[in-house]
Amino acid sequence: MSLWETFTLAVKNISGSKMRTFLTMLGIIIGVCAVIVIVGLGNGMAGYMEDSFAEMGTNTLTVSIMGRGTSRTVSEEQMYQIVEDNAGYLDQISPTVSMTGSVKIGSTTYSSTSVSGVGETWFDMKGYEVAQGRGIEYMDIVNRKKVCVVGNYVAQTCFGGNAVGQSLKVGGTTFSIVGVMAQEAEQMEEGGTDDCVYVPYSTAARLSFTGTISSYTVTVTDEEYAALGKEAIETALYKIFQDEDAYTVVSMAEMLDTMTSMVNMVIAILAAIAGISLLVGGIGIMNIMLVSVTERTREIGIRKALGAREGIILRQFVIEAATTSALGGGLGIILGYLMSAVATQVIKRLMETAITVSPSATAVLAAFGISAGIGILFGYLPAKRAARLDPIEALRYD
């Protein structure tokens, strides 16, 4: 009997009892579906984190200066010099100062609008475009001018799109609007990326009553140099402070790698747990194949009496088990893709987060391969039992 004839016979035997076959495959279907959805969810979360960090800049280093006591700190000139001395790794730098106090335009106060003091390179570093007017300039910083650039949400909501030349107040101080940023987010909303005000960092530092800069944003020439750039800054700051607790340097690329590794670990554990149902499905296949051998004992005896070798009998039952398992794996893949699409919509509606559950081809092939392999593995024992039946005893079986 050829391999194709054996496969055709296996399909005929499977289709002869559809309900029993379906219940046998159920564990495999659920296991393959669960693995595909969980791995797809992991891919979606990883993609979402990459997009989120891309907005912040994976080529960005954030430097926070705590200082050492009240006498030792680092000046802006020293920080700029550090970047210049390591031009092979480091590209641009901008001091950043967070300002407290609400934004007041006319008689209306906007408490959710963020106000930050930045340098003239800030917009270039972040990839922001100034759609109207101009950005923060070097002379604004030198002269501590009370000028600002507003986000598109502020310009549209408060000034009807004509914000340049108007004024607003931050904590009681009046600023003249010299520029409007282009829209950054797909949808502008209160408290979002476009609901912001940027002022010269020197002005912000003076109004904060400290007069010192404690936070800097530095970009690297290439994401691959993030670790080297971080090390260069830490080495330079240690020479100044002689104390590792006087500063922190955070790499967005390293944070992304760490978070991605954690997500992948969790997803791997969940996928392994879901894979247990594949094992359960394999046990179900073994049980049903043992029952099938018992039911077809007389048939096996007749075939062996007619000259069928043990290898042919063994092959028939192994192929039948593998076909059942592979069919369950195929149905599991279809269900997995359907559930992934449903999960994407559910996450979007319930969490208002754009996480796309996207199954990977590797996970799909692995799940299908494992399901087929389980059929062969758990189908071998019943097949071996069938192949070793004594033909005389089998013919006597009633």
Image (tube, rainbow, N blue to C red):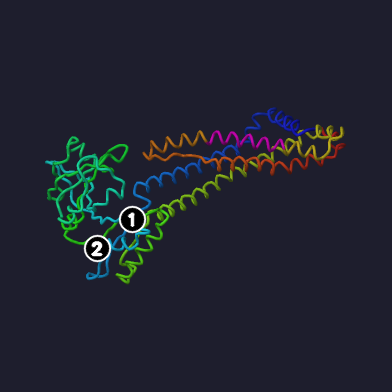
Few, some or many residues within 10 Å of mark 1 (<14, 14–19, 20+): some
Few, some or many residues within 10 Å of mark 2 (<14, 14–19, 20+): few
Location of the N terminus (image quadrant)? top right
Q: Residue at x 44, y 46 (%)?
A: 46
Q: Secondary structure at mark 2?
A: helix
Rendering quarter of residue 293 = top right
Task: From the viewer's perspective, tell me whether residue 184 is left or right of residue 1.
Answer: left
Residue 147 drawn at (x, y percent): 16, 48
Task: From the viewer's perspective, tell me whether residue 229 is left or right of residue 81.
Answer: right
**Residue closest to the eye, 33 or 213:** 213
Residue 36 drawn at (x, y percent): 53, 40
Disc 1 + disc 2, Cβ < 8 Å: no
Please say if 213 is above or below 388.
Answer: below
- Callout 1, which amino acid? Asp
Q: Residue at x 37, y 54 (%)?
A: 221
Q: Which residues are drawn in magenta?
A: 319-336
The residue to which callout 2 is attached is 77
The residue to which callout 1 is attached is 91
